[in-house]
Image (tube, rainbow, N blue to C red):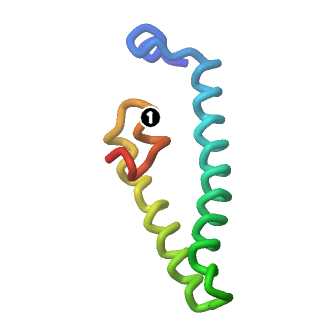
Amino acid sequence: MPLYLIHELHIDITGTGTRTALCYLSAALGAVVIGRVLEHITFRNGIHPPYRRFIVAICLAGAATIGFLPHFHTMTPILLGPVST
């Protein structure tokens, strides 16, 4: 790990690994929870397969926000996503 990251940003290898794993874990859990919630909302009046495209569109719009990540410098807005912006 470069000394700049250690001295200036106070980043260590353990913290970096933990934060990286936390981001992937929360993304996986968020995908499952959001998928279940959106399917429940969409299909509560019966099964309408054409409405599944709305679920896909919302998830794709959420995934498109990854382009904004370089503008955030703390983990909280990154984990909260579009809600905090």
Residue 85 in the image: state x and y as whole percent: 32, 47
Front residue of 63/84: it is 84
For mark 1, give the secondary structure.
helix
Q: Compared to 30, does 47 lie above or below? A: below
Front residue of 20/47: it is 47
Q: Compared to 20, does 48 lie above or below? A: below
Residue wearing tag 1: 76
Residue 13 in the image: state x and y as whole percent: 61, 19
Front residue of 4/59: it is 59
Residue 48 in which image quadrant: bottom right
In the figure, is residue 53 to the left or right of 21? left
Residue 49 in which image quadrant: bottom right
- Residue sitting at the far top: 7
Quadrant of the rendering where the N terminus is positioned = top right
Q: Residue at x 63, y 79 (%)?
A: 44
In the figure, is residue 60 to the left or right of 31? left
Residue 39 in which image quadrant: bottom right
Q: Residue at x 59, y 20 (%)?
A: 15
Q: Residue at x 48, y 70 (%)?
A: 58
Q: Residue at x 39, y 45 (%)?
A: 69
Residue 35 in the image: state x and y as whole percent: 63, 65
Residue kind at label 1, given as amino acid type: Thr
Front residue of 79/37: it is 37
